[in-house]
Every structure is written in C-alpha cells, then in structure tokens.
Image (cartoon, coloured by chain):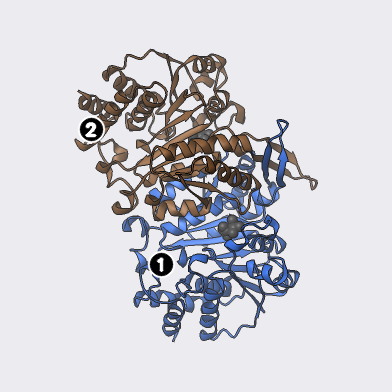
Chain colours: A brown, B blue
Amino acid sequence: MIALLPGDGIGPEVIAEAVRVLDAAGCALDFQQAAVGGAAYRESGHPLPETTLDLARRADAILFGAVGDPACDTLERRLRPEQAILGLRRELALFANLRPAKLFAELADASALRPEVAAEIDLVIVRELNGDVYFGEKGMRTTPAGRRQGYDVMAYDEDEVARIARVGFETAMARGRTLCSVDKANVLETSQLWRDVVTEIASEYPQVALSHMYVDNAAMQLVRNPGQFDVIVTGNLFGDILSDQASMCAGSIGMLPSASLDSAGKGLYEPIHGSAPDIAGQGKANPLATILSAAMMLRYSLGRAEEADRIEAAVAAALAGGARTPDLGGTLSTSQMGDAVIEALA
Amino acid sequence: MIALLPGDGIGPEVIAEAVRVLDAAGCALDFQQAAVGGAAYRESGHPLPETTLDLARRADAILFGAVGDPACDTLERRLRPEQAILGLRRELALFANLRPAKLFAELADASALRPEVAAEIDLVIVRELNGDVYFGEKGMRTTPAGRRQGYDVMAYDEDEVARIARVGFETAMARGRTLCSVDKANVLETSQLWRDVVTEIASEYPQVALSHMYVDNAAMQLVRNPGQFDVIVTGNLFGDILSDQASMCAGSIGMLPSASLDSAGKGLYEPIHGSAPDIAGQGKANPLATILSAAMMLRYSLGRAEEADRIEAAVAAALAGGARTPDLGGTLSTSQMGDAVIEALA
Ligand SMILES: CC(C)[C@H](C(=O)O)[C@@H](O)C(=O)O
Ligand SMILES: CC(C)[C@H](C(=O)O)[C@@H](O)C(=O)O
C-alpha cells in the first residue's frame, strides 16, 4: 500500500498527475490518501495527525506533495505545516535524503548557468535528515542582560555520521566512485566529528575517491564548475541549502525529485520544490518532479526498476516532444503535462 | 596608522600590490606590519599573537590578506590559522561584514551564469560576524549511549540582531531601498527571533521595502535571478555561504572585496577569497579584490572617498584595457596586474 499525502498549495495538483502516470504505466498500486500540513491542520488542528502518521507507518512507501501555507505563518511553530514533513522524516527514521540533480538535455535553456557549464551537471546530494540543528534542543531564553535570545543546538554523534556516510559511499560506488563530503570543520565541532568519522568510514570503501570541502567553497563550486561533483554527502542544514542551489543550476526546481529512505529501504518520495502558494490551484505547476519522484519510489522501495525506467523515459520523450509548463518557458497546464507523459508511455 | 596583516598563502602577494597602489595614489599612509595565521603560528606558536592583536587595536584600520595553511590542519582548532580572523572579528567587535557583489561589465565572460543573468548582479550582503553558531558554546561530549558527539550552539539575542538589522537598513537607504532578510525561521528558533526583530526595526525605516526569505530559497534565487536583490542581511553562517556563492555568480572570487566594521567605523578590510595555498608564491593570484578592499578602507574608515573612487576607477580602466590574471582567463602575474592599475591611476 502506498500512502498518498498531497499536502498544501500545488501538492494535490502534482500528486494527481503522478497517480495518473503510475496508473497509465500499469503499476496497479493500492493508494490510500490522508491529509497533511496546513490541510490537516484545518481539518484536525494538527499538521501531522495520528491517523496520517499511522497510515505512513503501515505503507510500503509514501508519495508526498508539498506542505507550507502562508495562512499558517502566525501559528506557533509546532502547529505549522512544515512540521509535518520534519515529523515524518524523524518518526519514520528516514535519515537518508537522495537528491539527484541533472540537466535534462532537452532543457539546456532553462538553467541560469551557461549551457556548457549546466550540461556538465550530473550529481547526487546525499543529505542527512534526522539530526543536525534541525532536531537539537531549541527555544527562547533570556540572557543575563535580560535580552530575548533564540537558540538551536547543532549536533551529530558518530553513529549518525557513520550511517549517512555509508549511504554516500554506496551511492558513489554505484556511480562515478567519487565522494565529496561537505562541512564547516574550520569553525564547527560538529563538522570536525563529521570529517573524522567520514574519513574513518572511507577505509571500508577503498575504491571511492573521497575529498572534503567547506560549505562556503561548495556553494561557490556548484556555480563555478558543478561538473566536478559526482556524489556529495552532507548534513541536514548544509544539504538543505546546497540541494536547492544545485537544483536551480540544473534548470527548474520543478524538475527534481527526491527520496528519503530509512535503513530498510522504505521511503518517502517528494519533489524538491515547495507548495508554491502563489500559483496553487491555477494548473500552472510542473508535475514532472513528482512524476520522477514516483519513478524513484518504484525503483528504491518497490523493486520495480523497469517501470521506473519506462516513466523516466516517457518524461524525457515528452520534453523532447516540446512539452513545457510555464516554469520551463511553455504554456502547458499541469494536467496537459501529465497527458504528454502518458502519451509518451503508450 | 594602518595595520597590515598579510597572513598566509597568497596573502602577502596581494597585500604587496594593494600597498603599491595606495602609495602610487599618493595616500601616504603609515603602515605597520605584523604576522597572522599560520605565519604567526610558526613564529610564535599562536595564530593571533598578543602583539598582532595589539597592533590591530591601535590601528585606524586593518588591511588583511588571507589565512589558512594546510600544514596546520592537524593542529587543535584553537591554534589553526582561521582562528586569527575569527579572533580579530570578535576581539575588535567587528560585527558588520559588507560584501558587495557586482559584475564588472568588462568581465561579463567570467561568470558561470549566462551573461544576461550575470549582468544584473549588483547587491551587497550584510553579514553578522560576531555571533551565531560561530561563537556559541561548542565541543565534544559523550552521548548517554556512549558515542562521541560534536555540538555547537547557534544563538542570537535581540540586541545582536537589532544592530546588524540597522546596518542592513542603512545600507539599503544608501542604495535601492530594498532589503531582503535571510533566515530559516521554519526550522530555527534563532531565525524566528531574527525575523521578529528585523520586522520590529523595519518601523524605523519606513522607506525601505523589507522582505524575508528562507536560506534554501535564497541560495536558489541567487542563481536563478540575482538581479532581484539589492541588500541582503543575514546571520554569520548563512552569510558565509551566500556571499561566497554570490561572489562566484558575479565572476571570479578574485575580484571581490569586503569590509568588517565595528560600531564606530573602524574596520578590517580583506578580499573574500582565501589563502589559495595551491597557487601561493607563484605570482598567479589576482590582487584586485585586495586593491578594492583598500579602496573600501579609504572610504569607510578613513573618510577619503575621492581616493577610493580614483582607485576603483583605475581598476575598471585596467580591466577595460584588457588586464587579466589567470583566474580571469589571462596571463598577467600578480605584480603585472598591480602595474596595470598603477598605470591607469596616472
Ligand atoms: C520545509 C522545510 C522544513 C524543509 C527543510 O528545511 O528540510 C524543506 O526546505 C526541504 O528541503 O525539504
Ligand atoms: C576562514 C573562515 C573561518 C571564514 C568564515 O567562515 O567566516 C571565511 O570563510 C570567511 O568567510 O571569511
């Protein structure tokens, strides 16, 4: 059973297209849907209700749209839509986030980078999702001088680093055997431990060439020469920043899928983009990131690589045939883009 | 008196050219030099010796090269070269880091971005330098399960945010009156306080249009459409990442200067680039970022805006005349680039 969590904004629109494509590809999956994010808050007063979490626990995989709703901005943080995705990642121990970034050859014009620079992009960011400053102790306190102070504790322990490092090395083994670990070890103790542990784990993977890079330099290199990267492994916060940046280097953020995996291969699949409230309900959203996330789900959690290949090929064929939503400079609606993929499947 | 702190790697080479240009411009400054970083560690066992800190305290302004030395990578953190610049920023209360990023029209080819996207870049990043996860409590500890854990506390109090916010608003007042505050308020309490305080301070500057952006989105927007930004104000860590990224969008990191100011206008001026040990001593470094940092020093700390203008115009003229170091695709040596600027001054 696949849990469908459409969420907020453009989430429902893009999930609908992914489901249509999965059906058209003959996948015959058993979907069960639940509310999440702002949508769930409105129904039940909580962005991640017990029933939704329960459905997600029972599912073989989760197909997730997006959460985020400006109308909820004034709620206290624990009630905000974003807490739903953070809660799912944490409750289901989805610690390994895989974010591939690759320019579809058909979209060479969509990147802000020079075409010859953008064409080189073919990398995967492996982002840790269960720790870092996201999940440490945090709060408001008063300083000795009587001032309000916000604080968040950043931390990683050696086991947390080791398990994501192994995902990084395994991913590199299946690709170009080159792993770049990104940290800020010249300033952070967390990063110093990160660097030490990644270096220790490297001895298990003698065929992988490991390098270390500071996050400020990595942000620069992703613009200067993104083609130098094969696999990047990094923490939750740096991964959040670098993967959005990389997705834009590779063209539209509307194109890029992601997988968040636990240690047994169960996963949550979601587009990298957010809920885009400004275009919600207008049929302008690009559904390809979600369709490609569904393909990742077939491959990683369901062991159905052939169907994944077929869907990915259909996306490439639709693009080659000129199908373009507004983010790609075209005029197709969300469902027309879904149609184009379905036609290409036939 | 100007404290000259050349530091490591290419630091001494680029500082030498800045001094030659200041002399040629007739500035007649009183320079006093001291060792810093790895160079100081080798001489005295500490990257920021008391004598160096003392000279910096007594100076009207500090012209700083770069620190960082791979030979020091195995030292404990407090002895590493990078601690020198962190120590200076903190000891001298240099809390406001101004990092302008603008593409010199002559260098339209140097950016990895499409020329039409790069041409639009004209922004200043105002980065807080005295707080955040850089200076909170940090260390190694053992978890209840007996595992090593690295931790770093991120924190800002309301006064720290208010004073950097005011620098952001003042900078915006002197430019396009548009300020974008960057945080991660959907995850961090520190950012929530940041956002609240920046919003409060906005009432003092009704003419400035304020917006808020999450850091992951900002990293994306800096690639997608950097022309949308006028002034960005952000914390120490996000500012570190975004300013390196922005510098690369604007062409070579070898071009961009920075100023780190206290509340009285005293400042430390340094190129954004690092010590580049791979090219140190080879005369390959681009001295323009340091020469432009010297111009910022004349303008911000010494009240000599005319001389600053002259030097900046000479840099533009040298570039227009075709002067290019290797990072810009040319063959001039560091001192030949200095010569080109000096000729243009005449
Ligand atoms: C919505 C937000 C909490 C989330 C994150 O920061 O992880 C998002 O930016 C992402 O990258 O999935
Ligand atoms: C050298 C390092 C500690 C420093 C920083 O992180 O602030 C550098 O990257 C910078 O931006 O000046």
Q: Residue at x 60, y 35 (%)?
A: A160
Q: Which residue is mark 2?
A: A318
Callout in the foreground (1, 2): 1
- On screen, residue A138 versus residue A115, left or right, reads right
Q: What type is the residue that disc 2 sits on?
A: Ala
- What is the spatial separation of the Cα atoms under label 1 and label 2, in whole angstroms? 40 Å
- On screen, residue B54 versus residue A210, left or right, reads right
For label 1, being within 8 Å of ligand 2 is answered: no
Q: Which residue is mark 1?
A: B327
Q: Chain of mark 1?
A: B
Q: Camera-side residue: A19 or A155?
A: A155
Q: Chain of mark 2?
A: A
Q: What type is the residue that disc 1 sits on?
A: Asp
Corner quadrant of residue A147 = top right
Asked if one can make out residue B107 in the rendered structure from this viewpoint, the answer is yes
Query: Furthest-right residue in view?
Result: A144
Callout 1 touching callout 2 (CB < 8 Å): no
Q: Residue at x 61, y 83 (%)?
A: B29
Q: Position of residue B72 (x, y in %)?
A: 63, 61
Q: Position of residue A281 (x, y in %)?
A: 37, 27
Q: Camera-side residue: A174 or B289?
A: A174
Q: Position of residue B159 (x, y in %)?
A: 70, 50
